[in-house]
């Protein structure tokens, strides 16, 4: 096959991968499993009543699931013209929101859930219970990826945040590798690194600020922000952008030689309520992560932080749009009977 024909073949192959992706829609299960959403909501509601850390856990599971991607060897970037050599093309075949974060490791094949950034993930049992409830009504119909997206929505809504119609139709993936969790944005990332991570997934700078607002829920272990409160740099032990009294409190909780694995801090002062307190605290020098503070180092993102700190309603409206956009990164291929294992 000549070089131009090879190039054309690779182009059409890559395009077919995109076109064959699963189309998401609101009423995907309207005929096949109309009560699926209600079943998921009831399970999530019961879990939250027993454990107020569940909302943060489920929202984080959804985010960590969606942000893992797989590179296709036959690839085409939207920025690459449809002519010339196929060498160097960089189209990303997204693994995305495919419930691969739920899969258990098999022997020496370590799954995403056992990757270093995911070691503190929990509340997997909530998805297991929701899957069981849905399977009893509609066997083999509703994907684990959709259940996870619905559970994340319910977690936000039941914590006082906005609700939204979740587009459905995701399929579950068969690939889950612990070493690919290094693609997740780290709490130590600066603005440039954050922007690159989000843009690679088709998400904007505004999406970056909005989805960071999910930090309004939950708890962070000392290791996530230790770099800001001990040996920050050659001139200062503490990150000078931190409020001094806030930094002192964090140092008490997390001493330099901390040996208490469970030690840490709530993400904001209302850590079980989905609200805009995260942004207000960030403007007061009370953001936990370097990646939180990074949002204030660029005029555009700093403007969004101020906007959402001033208006919870605007934050809620933006959050709905951004999480739906993030939840559309998908590329699975089956509906698993067991969310924790490949069929």
Image: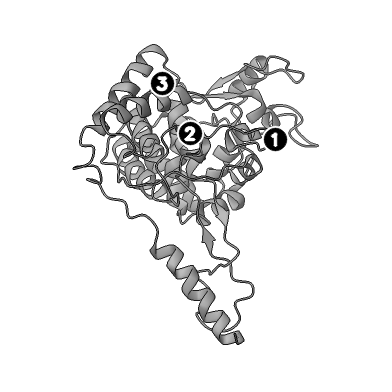
Disc 1 vs disc 2: which is toward the camera?
1
Return the x and y of residue 307 as percentages of the image width and height.
38, 43
Q: Are marks 1 and 2 in contact (CB under 8 Å)?
A: no
Q: CA distance from mark 3 to mark 1?
A: 37 Å
Report the front residue among 148 and 133: 133
The disc at residue 61 is: 2
Q: Give the residue furthest to the right.
A: 234
N-terminal of the pair, mark 3 or mark 1, is 1
Q: Which residue is mark 3?
A: 272
The disc at residue 331 is: none
* Secondary structure category for the residue under label 2: helix
* Horizontal side, residue 138 vs residue 130: left or right: left
Q: CA distance from mark 2 to mark 3?
A: 16 Å
Label 2, residues with CA under 10 Å away: few <14, some 14-19, many ≥20 = many
Return the x and y of residue 14 as percentages of the image width and height.
49, 68
Q: Is the residue 200 above or below the residue 283 in the image?
A: below
The disc at residue 108 is: 1
Report the front residue among 293 and 119: 119
N-terminal of the pair, mark 1 or mark 2, is 2
Label 3, residues with CA under 10 Å away: few <14, some 14-19, many ≥20 = many
Q: Residue at x 27, y 50 (%)?
A: 25
């Amino acid at each position: 096959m000549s070089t131009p024909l090879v190039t054309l073949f690779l182009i059409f192959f890559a395009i077919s991968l995109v076109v064959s992706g699963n189309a998401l829609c609101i009423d995907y299960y309207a005929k096949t499993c109309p009560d699926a959403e209600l079943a998921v909501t009831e399970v999530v509601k019961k879990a939250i009543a027993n454990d107020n850390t569940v909302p943060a856990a489920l929202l984080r599971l959804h985010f960590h699931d969606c942000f893992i991607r797989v590179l296709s060897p036959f690839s085409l970037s939207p920025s690459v013209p449809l002519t010339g050599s196929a060498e160097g093309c960089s189209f990303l075949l997204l693994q995305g929101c495919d419930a691969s974060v739920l899969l258990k490791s098999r022997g020496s094949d370590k799954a995403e859930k056992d990757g270093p950034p995911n070691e503190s993930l929990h509340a997997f049992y909530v998805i297991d219970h929701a899957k069981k409830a849905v399977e009893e009504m509609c066997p083999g119909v509703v994907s684990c990826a959709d259940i996870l997206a619905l559970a994340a929505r319910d977690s936000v809504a039941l914590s006082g945040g906005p609700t939204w119609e979740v587009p459905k139709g995701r399929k579950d993936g068969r690939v889950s590798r612990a070493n690919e969790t290094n693609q997740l944005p780290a709490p130590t990332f600066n603005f440039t690194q954050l922007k690159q991570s989000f843009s690679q997934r088709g998400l904007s700078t505004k999406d970056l600020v909005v989805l960071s607002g999910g930090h309004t829920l939950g708890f962070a272990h000392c290791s996530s922000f230790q770099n800001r409160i001990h040996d920050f740099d050659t001139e200062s032990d503490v990150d000078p952008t931190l409020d001094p009294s806030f930094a002192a409190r964090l140092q008490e909780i997390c001493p330099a030689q901390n040996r208490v694995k469970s030690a840490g801090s709530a993400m904001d002062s209302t850590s079980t309520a989905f609200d805009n307190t995260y942004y207000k605290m960030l403007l007061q020098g009370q953001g936990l992560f370097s990646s939180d503070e990074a949002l204030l180092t660029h005029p555009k993102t700093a403007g969004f932080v101020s906007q959402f700190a001033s208006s919870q309603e605007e934050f809620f409206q933006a959050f709905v749009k951004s999480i739906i956009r993030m939840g559309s990164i998908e590329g699975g291929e089956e509906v698993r009977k067991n969310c924790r294992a490949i069929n």
